[in-house]
Amino acid sequence: QVRLVESGGGLVQAGGSLRLSCAASGRSFAIYGMGWYRQAPGKQRELVADITSRGSTNYADSVKGRFTISRDNAKNTVYLQMNSLKAEDTAVYYCNAEIRVVGGEIHDYWGQGTQVVVSS
């Protein structure tokens, strides 16, 4: 069984920063792409940023220049550094990873979500 566990959410004032972390744990697995999604109240879940196993990144236009995604493959962890936060960044943030358990196929795994609230 593979699990993704997120941390780092919270309440911050507009203009502030937060860093989210997501660590994968389990036995005998390989991670491919990793990413962060978010879902605001009444809205669909949307991609924030993703990163390939080789470090190529992709960002939503709304966060370019403010958010940075990175990963530590040795720790099976992906990070999201969020700077210059705005009220519209308020959402539940979910970690996603493409994972292959040894002997199996690649599947999407999701974290439980971490709340980010930006006060204006």
Image (cartoon, rainbow, N blue to C red):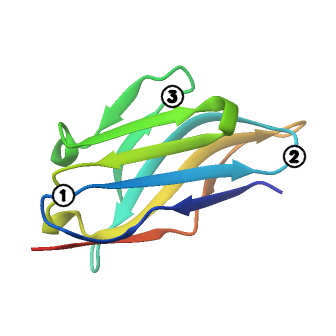
Residue 62, given in percent of the width and then of the height, sits at 17, 48
Please name whichever residue, 42 or 9, is drawn nearer the observer in this view of the structure.
Answer: 9
Report if the CB atoms under discs 1 and 3 are less than 8 Å apart: no
Quadrant location of the N terminus in the rendered image? bottom right
Quadrant in which residue 46 is drawn: bottom left
The residue singled out by tag 2 in the image is 27
Q: Nearer the viewer, mark 2 or mark 1?
A: 1
CA gap between label 2 and label 1 equals 36 Å
> At x 67% / y 38%, what residue is drawn?
75
Question: What SS does tag 3 mark?
Answer: loop
Residue 40, percent from left and from top? 29, 72
Which amino acid type corresponds to the residue marked 2 in the rendered image? Arg
Residue 3 appears left or right of 20: right
Residue named by callout 1? 85
User: Which is nearer the N-term, disc 1 or disc 3?
Assistant: 3
How many angstroms separate mark 3 from mark 2 (CA)? 21 Å
In the image, residue 19 above or below residue 73: below
* SS state under label 2: loop
Residue ID at (25%, 43%): 60
Is residue 72 positioned above or below 39 on the image?
Answer: above
Mark earlier in primary sequence (3, 2): 2
- Of labels 3 and 2, the one closer to you: 2
Identify residue type, mark 3: Thr
Q: Secondary structure at mark 1?
A: loop
Of badges 1 and 3, nearer the viewer stands 1
Location of residue 48 in the rendering, given as x and y in whole percent from the top left corner: 33, 49
Residue 52's disc number: 3
In the rendered image of this protein, does residue 47 appear above or below residue 117?
above
Q: Position of residue 55 (x, y in %)?
A: 48, 23
- The amino acid pointed to by label 1 is Leu
Q: CA distance from mark 1 to mark 3?
A: 25 Å
Considering the image in quadrants, where does the C terminus appear? bottom left
